[in-house]
Amino acid sequence: MRCNSSQYSNSIPLEETDPRALSGDVFVSKWLPDLLSLSVQQHNISDYSISRNDQNITVYEAHVETTEQACIPKSVLYDVNVTFPRGVQKLEYHMSDETDVRKKWHDASESFSGQLTSSALSLTIPANPQAARDWNTKVLDALPVFNQWAILDALGSLLEGVGKEISTNHDYSRCGPLTARDNKTTTKRCDDWTTLMSCHADPPSSEAPLRGTVFQPTRFDPASLKTCYDAREELNITEALLNDVLTNITLSAISLGTWHEVLPIIITRYQSTYSFANPLNLILPYSICFLVASIFAGIAIYSLLRNGTPAADGGFLQIMTTTRGNTEMERVVLRHDLTKMEKLPMELRRLKVRYGELVGSDVPGFEGRAGFGTAQETISLRKRK
């Protein structure tokens, strides 16, 4: 958008809403789709006049100082660079090749007999091959202009709105003397408008244009909800802000999937790495734990080799079956390759054993050693003197 501002004196009509109330449109934002232009007018009422004719028809008119901003759309080429540093989307762009949209619209219209209407764009089927090719070429040339117009129309329709100012203490008798008479019509100049105006703190949405949008800088200020909403004071419709909104709409439209293009991309893969400021705090405790666990694992392996059978949960029987000794009980255990105590054979269950001093020809070298064995392989332990 390219905008120009101007100021001039003007007059606007007033409407009598109640017997003692007048209202006027002091903020008018209008989008003209046929002309592809946006007009934002702000009127400051100084005073007003009342005109009556011989048929007692009253017309109210306000004298205003008007500030008008007229914006003309331009077509630009966006060079967009989308990156994802650390997985976060970052978008950079710059614009170039600025041209007048209205000229492009005019050139596209010339291809369709000077007007872009549904009838001008229609094609009667069946059509001869040459007519179909010509129609296809014209539509392809006009589609980019249609896309630009659609984005502009979406924003322009959003910006349309009217803000009113109200005088609630109007009285015809307080108007000044007769100032003009023309064609049986009398006109009187009335009081200073600023002494009579009032407003609503919470007007309806139809009388609060663009409230809560990006064009209202105080939209997040709770105090603004408690004051009178005056679009002339609350809104900040500038060329820069309009272009920012248009850019957001244009780039967001990419996600609609309407346009498709093959683009070069660069993929960078990131791998997380960790470093410790004090590695000793990690290495030392884990090393101690590993060393202690290794010692106990060695003891367990040595015990398994010495006992000759796995150490499973078996209570008192586990103690008996894992006590090392060249006894009948051990031979039965090894013969049946015991791994679980619930699978003890009947031969071992019926075996009578006792804990005593191992003796006998079958246990050479074990004299004086205590352990579990059968009654024939052990003698009662004696107290040492």
Image (cartoon, helix red, strand yellow):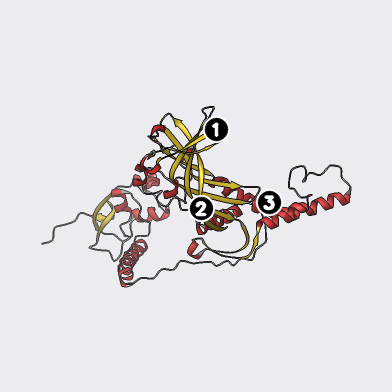
Within 10 Å of disc 3 (Cα), the crowding (few <14, some 14-19, many 20+) is some
Q: Is residue 91 left or right of residue 194?
A: right
Within 10 Å of disc 2 (Cα), the crowding (few <14, some 14-19, many 20+) is few
The amino acid sitting under disc 1 is Lys
Disc 3 marks which residue?
146
Nearer mark to the viewer, of 3 and 1: 1
Within 10 Å of disc 1 (Cα), the crowding (few <14, some 14-19, many 20+) is few
The percent position of residue 169, horizontal first and vertical second, equals: 37, 34
Disc 1 marks which residue?
184
- C-alpha span from label 1 to label 2: 30 Å
Quarter residue 100 falls in: bottom right
Disc 2 marks which residue?
8
- C-alpha span from label 3 to label 1: 52 Å
Which element carries disc 1, helix, strand or loop?
A: loop
The percent position of residue 383, horizontal first and vertical second, equals: 13, 58
Q: Which mark is residue 162?
A: none
Q: Residue at x 49, y 61 (%)?
A: 88
Q: Is residue 200 left or right of residue 126?
A: left
Q: Residue at x 66, y 57 (%)?
A: 101
Which element carries disc 3, helix, strand or loop?
A: helix
- Mark 1 near mark 2, Cβ–Cβ under 8 Å? no
The percent position of residue 286, horizontal first and vertical second, equals: 33, 67
